[in-house]
Amino acid sequence: MEELFVNALIRDKRIPITNFITHGKMEELFVNALIRDKRIPINNFITHLKMEELFVNALIRDKGIPINNFITHLKMEELFVNALIRDKGIPINNFITHLKMEELFVNALIRDKGIPINNFITHLKMEELFVNALIRDKGIPINNFITHLKMEELFVNALIRDKGIPINNFITHLKMEELFVNALIRDKGIPINNFITHGKTEELFVNALIRDKEIPINNFITHLKMEELFVNALIRDKRIPINNFITHLKMEELFVNALIRDKGIPITNFITHGKMEELFVNALIRDKRIPITNFITHLKMEELFVNALIRDKRIPITNFITHGKMEELFVNALIRDKRIPITNFITHLKMEELFVNALIRDKRIPITNFITHGKMEELFVNALIRDKGIPINNFITHLKMEELFVNALIRDKRIPITNFITHGKMEELFVNALIRDKRIPITNFITHGKMEELFVNALIRDKRIPITNFITHGKMEELFVNALIRDKRIPINNFITHLKMEELFVNALIRDKRIPITNFITHGKMEELFVNALIRDKWIPINNFITHL
């Protein structure tokens, strides 16, 4: 509501102001009026609004509302926080769980002990002053403090120094800074086993683990990104059955080389999840250490491997197809050597030009299967139209038709155009053709399409379709709105609920009184001219106007 409407409501008392409150953003003039004139039980005003300073002051000063309700959902400004602490108008316990406490409130809580600090902890980001106070005054069992907070250095130091907490709980969820890691290793305050599975381990910790043998390294492996020093140590010292190391890690070259060189692991396990570098692929092909069949389904094959597969015939290529991105050399080989039933090749791949040409030229596959999922390039579309290799009916529903295909369809009348309409973005040439040639009942065309000006003009000019269907989903351009008002072709009642009315339509409605304006209100964005008209002419019970605007 702009100022003119708010003033009018307050001045003329046309509406019970109670309804006005729950959803609106109140401007200063309205808030002042409410407080001054006491027109509304202020209780309802609170839960959903962002209170400006003038209203907060008024509430505290005049105590028109039980402040308890005010707390849980609002961001309290400093003046309100001060007032609460000073006047104790509210049990502060409720104040805590949802609010971001400013420094003044934190200080007050610690100083005045108005609240059991236990509740304060789990959800808040504690500033340094509060952390210091907790450690200094021990007002809270620190155990609860740990699991959810990001500890600053001062707190970590204090915990280690004062041992106020069993450090076991501290570990699993926190990002440990170097000082804490050093302290753990130095003071052995925690069974390091718990430390491993979730932490990001820095070099100093890894070195300490290897050096001091404090942990069964088996547990260390599955979730961590191992730095070079750890990988080297594992291979060099043989502390861990390397089998466990493989499935989840990105292996650096040093580890891959070590595996191939030292044969420390059945390489079969290595394959399914790893990104194989060229050195490993070469080694596999050269040394025949692994049944290559397992290697295929999940990997991105580099050219050297593809060449090797084709050259050495080590694998039934049938398995190779469904998931791989085929490079040109492989596609050529498949077509040239006829190693695979090409039918399987089609449904999941992006076909390059050389493959499409080969399919059309050699007629190796029923092209019907090719259509529903592929992105058709111009050469394929031309070939389909030219060679009639496919019932074009199937071609339509899922594809974005290029101009050459649309022209061909219209020119050659190969397909019942009815199927073409519901999902396609119609280009101007097709729309013109439809209107010109009367090939399709235009009724089907309307509900989902974005109508261009030429089509709208044609509909109005030629009266081909009951315009009633046209309304609910379309974005009406000015020419259509003018036509509707001018020609009285449609009961305007249906026109209203879903559309953003432009000024010309609003003016027309007010001027000509064509529609019960009651329907117009609940969903529309009212411009100033309409609001003025409503207030001036008293056409609508203003009660309905309020709740949604």
Image (tube, rainbow, N blue to C red):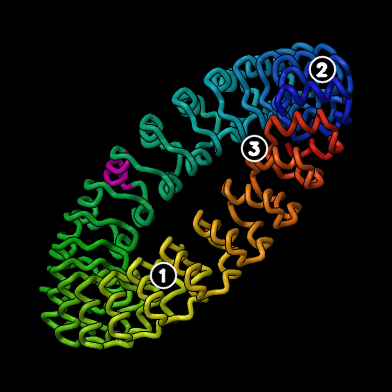
Residue 452 visible to the viewer: yes
Is tag 2's residue or tag 1's residue first in the polypeptide sequence? 2
Task: Find disc 1 in the rendering and name its residue.
Answer: 399
Whether residue 230 is situated above or below residue 248 in the rendered picture: above
Pick the quarter of the image with the N terminus: top right
Crowding at dot 1, Cα within 10 Å, few <14 / some 14-19 / many 20+, comes out as some
The Cα–Cα distance between marks 1 and 3, rounded to whole angstroms, is 39 Å
Whether residue 96 is situated above or below residue 488 in the rendered picture: above
Is 212 colored magenta in this rendering? yes
In front: 18, or 259? Answer: 18
Residue 271 sits in which quadrant? bottom left
In front: 95, or 26? Answer: 26
**Identity, as a three-letter code, of the amino acid under mark 1:** Leu
Magenta residues, start to end: 205-213
* CB under 8 Å between discs 1 and 3: no
Task: Find disc 3 in the rendering and name its residue.
Answer: 503
Task: Nearest to the eye among marks 1 and 3: give it.
Answer: 3
The x and y percentages for residue 206 are 30, 43
Is tag 1's residue or tag 3's residue first in the polypeptide sequence? 1
The x and y percentages for residue 527 are 68, 33
SS category of the residue bearing label 2? helix
Most frequent secondary structure within the magenta stretch? helix
Task: Find disc 2 in the rendering and name its residue.
Answer: 33
Residue appearing at x 27%, y 44% in the figure: 211
* CB under 8 Å between discs 2 and 1: no
Would residue 465 appear left or right of 386 to someone viewing this image?
right
In front: 329, or 398? Answer: 398
The x and y percentages for residue 75 are 66, 25
Q: How many marks?
A: 3
SS category of the residue bearing label 1? loop
Would residue 266 appear left or right of 21 to someone viewing this image?
left
Residue 269 visible to the viewer: no
